[in-house]
Amino acid sequence: MFEIIERKMIVPNLHLLTVHAPDVVEQIQPGQFVIIHAGEGAERIPLSAADWNSEDGTLTIIFMEVGTSTGMLAALKPGDQIPTVVGPLGKPTEIENFGTVICIGGCYGMGSIYPIVKALKEKGNTVITIMEGRSKNLLYWEEKLSGYSDKIIKLTRDGSYGYKGHIKKGEDIIRELGVKPDRVIANGCTTLSYMTTQEYKHFNVPIIVALNTIMIDGTGMCGVCRCTVEGKMKFACVDGPEFDGRYVDWEELAKRRKQYIGEEAFLVHHSGCGGY
Ligand code: FES
């Protein structure tokens, strides 16, 4: 069993969960995820690591409350126990000294981009971080992200904080600043990943997106997370979750997600994501 250390809503509908999972923390690297099971009646959910502490063996994730399983996670209190935290899963983010890297986080991705931002900065990159949300009250971890970013750009679609706009506005600012990125990395919903790919592809650099496909086992056995990249079949759980968005078959991905359209509509309505 895994003990819950902390659980709180950090912005409307997004929760921070810290769990004691020392074996996972011992091996985890930026970009990896875990599968969490809150208990009887819940489904196994893949959730990206947002932070961890090697000294006390705690792992922090940010998740959106969007249905029964995440609702059960959102009801957890410190001292509660959950039966499953499996991981680390997926391939870690490639961390090198690339030069200038733009890191974009939206929704739960403002959390999961944090270890990537930190590792890239520690490798000597110039890191420009873009936080994106519908409104000011949906942005979080600005201070943590600023600590490892050379520049931080805040975007809100209603203009309540930072610049008014969405992914395109972020790209406009990057161009106006005369920044020539060597790599772009985006964490967030499928729409954020897709739009980032479209808006930044003219730079002709890798656009690394973490695909949030549906997953069951997370180990390459069930095939649910199948996607096509560069014309080849891939499993997001073992071959990803990160891929170069320029080579992802987005049409196929959208079709596969359509079977969950009801859940997606619920998510959009309740999350403040609004990207669909
Ligand atoms: Fe089953 Fe990826 S989640 S193959």
Image (cartoon, rainbow, N blue to C red):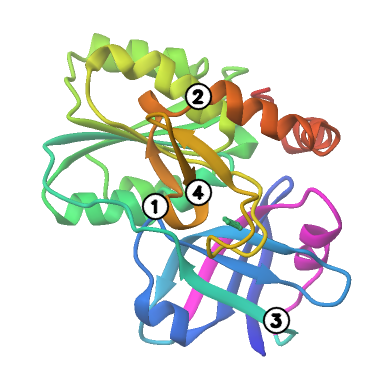
Tell me, yes or no, whether the two marked residues, 3 and 4, touch with CB atoms within 8 Å. Answer: no
Q: Earlier in the sequence, mark 3 or mark 1?
A: 3
Give the Cα separation between the discs numbered 3 and 1. 24 Å
Q: Residue at x 40, y 14 (%)?
A: 199
Does dot 3 land on a helix, a strand or a loop?
Answer: loop
Q: Is residue 142 above or below residue 26?
A: above
Does dot 4 land on a helix, a strand or a loop?
Answer: helix
What crowding class fits label 4: few (fewer than 14 Cα within 10 Å), some (14-19), or many (20 or more)? many
In which of the image's four quarters is ligand 1 placed?
A: bottom right
Q: Nearer the viewer, mark 3 or mark 2?
A: 2
Q: Which residue is mark 1?
A: 114
Q: Magenta segment, which residues?
A: 58-78
Q: Which residue is mark 4?
A: 236
Q: Is residue 74 above or below residue 57?
A: above
Residue 69 in the magenta stretch? The answer is yes
Q: Nearer the viewer, mark 4 or mark 1?
A: 4
Near-viewer residue (195 or 175): 195
> Which disc number belongs to residue 194?
2
Q: Residue at x 20, y 26 (%)?
A: 181
